[in-house]
Image (cartoon, grey):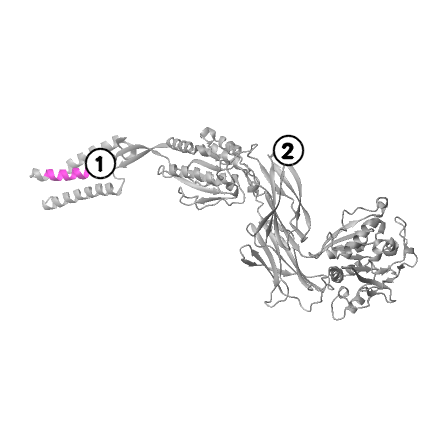
Amino acid sequence: MTSFAFEPIYGSLLLAMAVAAVTVGVILAVTPPTNDTRRRKWLIALRLLAATMLLLAAFRPALFRTDNQLAEAALIIAIDTSRSMSLPDGDGNSRWETQAKVWKILADNILGLDNQLDVKLLTYDSEAKSVAAPSSESLTSLTPSGKSTDISAAALSAMQAAEGQPLAGIVLIGDGTQTSDQQGTGAQRVAETLDSLGVPLWTVPVGPAAGISASRDAAVESLPESYQLFAGNEFDVKFQVSTRGMSGIDVPIRLTWIDAEGNTTEVAKRQIVPTKATDVTPVSIPIQTPQPGTYRLKVEAIPIEKELVDTNNTQFAFVEVRDGGGRILYLEGTPRLEQTFLRRSLRRFPDLALDYQWIPADTVDRWPVDLNGAFEPGKYDIYIIGDLHADAIGEEQLRQLADTIGKGAGLITLGGVFSYGGGGYANSPLARVLPVQMDPNRARSAGSPRDPAEGSQIDSDVRPELSRAHPITDLGGAAPANIWKELPPLLGANRLVGPKVAPGVQVILETETDDPLLIIGEYGRGRLAALAFDSTWRWWKSGRNEVHRRFWRQMALWLLSRENSGDRRLVITIDQRRFATDKPPEFRVEMQSLTEQNAATPLVAEIVAEDGKTMPLNTSTEGSGNQSNRFAQAIRGRIPELPVGFYRLRVRGKAADSDLPPEQLAFQVIDKSRELAQPLADPAYLKQLAALTADHGGTFFLPEDANDLVSRIKERRSLAETPVVEKFRLGDGPFTGWLLFGIFACTLSAEWFLRRQWGLA
């Protein structure tokens, strides 16, 4: 619509008209008289034209044009880029794919809708980010990788993204699940603020809500991180399966070996049937140990239909299978200090697996104890019998033990009140096996007081001396005998009758008075060691723990016929072998040496990925407060943050010509994201947020109703028209202003020039 009006100076039209009348009168009155009428008319015309310009400037005529235009505003669209968007949406697609379709519909219909609408695109996870120059293809280069979702931060950032522009509305798309620790007042407070400003919030929930089928989930849990096994054995794999929403449904379980080259072999398959909606089922599956090598044991609950999350269906255990013997059974009757430190020493070596069984003296009425086939050939490679009466084992099981030793097993007998003759072994099937002579008269009945028979014990301190060189008693150094002399004395010993006179029987340790302390021998294909003492723990307590470990390890290796094994090795320990990406553990590497080293060997630690790429690690040398621990050195470090996957921690000597065998330990970096731990969406939360702005058109839309959302946005824009008035007033612009001034100046100049020419000036 167009209109015309005057805007006179001082706002008074009467004043302007009076000024015009006075101006015309003055012009007519002051024009000089002349005999030439034509000249007088020219002068009056020029003066009237100049006066007209002045009057136009005074009346200020204006042209008005009124039009309805859309108001300038910003439309904010927020897209969820957290990892939960990689989960299924319940309709066969991922939530990210569904969200991308919604964005494309919005972009194709809203971008460029009108020149006054500024469409801004935000992505959010734990924080919100703006996407420059949004287009329908803006999401193609993005992936949902955020570790958590903060909906409150997304809503607040969306409101702030307008940057001072009026808000046409906010579109919030996502699964509605808040996994970040909420900061501030939360998304609800933001929605209330939008309501007070008259701004609608439109939400688009993506993903399935809780339901009977939508909440199905099976998770493998509590599988040990690692096993150290020996080839040819059977062992039980124990774990548990947690289920939700699977009552009465068969859940298949599968166990698979994965060797170092990545080859897979399925070894067992079972099915469990949960009986409750939420259930935890313990599972134990016996399987056969494979050939020697390093393996991963994969335990998997095979995903079933409509199970949204399968990242928790699998757990891996790292398995090291060793060749040859190394399985030890330690039977003890009296829980002495000796058993504590002996077990501690032997268990430090990964190639030795020790089982311990205590048979208390107060269970004598139930002797012999059934040891469940522990003495069957091949069950164990070494047997240790402590201060335990022969009746606790029983004649039948001792006969089986004797036969097993004859077939290649080893046996260690320790000193004690109920050892040897005092424990009734002189009349047992072991009498023909042990390399010592035994006196039946020393026998004590089972359950009797622990007073030893007269003359059966050496009650004073005992300092062992070497009677001959042997791998068991070689504690390193140039003079092994000197090391034995440096050790603290033992607290007494059994007074053995003496060694048997038989091939292979030798006394390798004795007292200063020639009482035998350690007698070794052979029986069939097996080896035996009879000790008269039971207090080597004193070595450990005095700070000579490396000597204690060496002695007992060499004892075990000799019984296994492996006494020629190398004397330097690396032992890697790590706090966890399965850990989350954001919680890497520390590791420690100890170089154990059975001989004293003159100088420490520089070590290098590195991470080896599955593709063979290596990453060097920073380590620090670990100091030891025990200066007598001369046979070990250690380094310490921390695993860095790594992507999810399998890796190896490899440690080797730094020098290229190092003769130290490298060692490596496999580990797994797993995903424990809170995003993926919650597979269900929370559409109700997004609906509640949108409902807070319902008075201004706020509501929620399902992804399939994205076109309805487009219509709602367009409808909202049509209601945002405002009248815009354009005014064109004479003299306001530089063109009309200079035009009036130019005409005024020219007419007065022409009038003055004519008067000069005509002699009237």
Q: Tell me the residue that label 2 is attached to.
A: 276
Front residue (pair 286, 59): 286
Vertical arrangement, residue 705 with respect to residue 227, above or below: above
User: At label 1, which amino acid type do we have?
Assistant: Leu
Magenta range is 40-54
Question: In terms of image quadrants, where is residue 540?
Answer: bottom right
Q: Residue at x 84, y 57 (%)?
A: 432
Instruction: Give how far across and how far down residue 550 sits, in percent.
Output: 74, 62
Q: Tell me the residue that label 1 is attached to.
A: 55
Question: Tag 2, which secondary structure?
Answer: loop
Vertical arrangement, residue 590 with respect to residue 89, above or below: below
In the rendered view of the protein, which quadrant contains the N terminus?
top left
Instruction: Give how far across and how far down residue 715 sits, in percent.
Output: 39, 31
Front residue (pair 496, 486): 496
Which residue sits furthest bottom? 478
717 vs 421, left or right, is: left
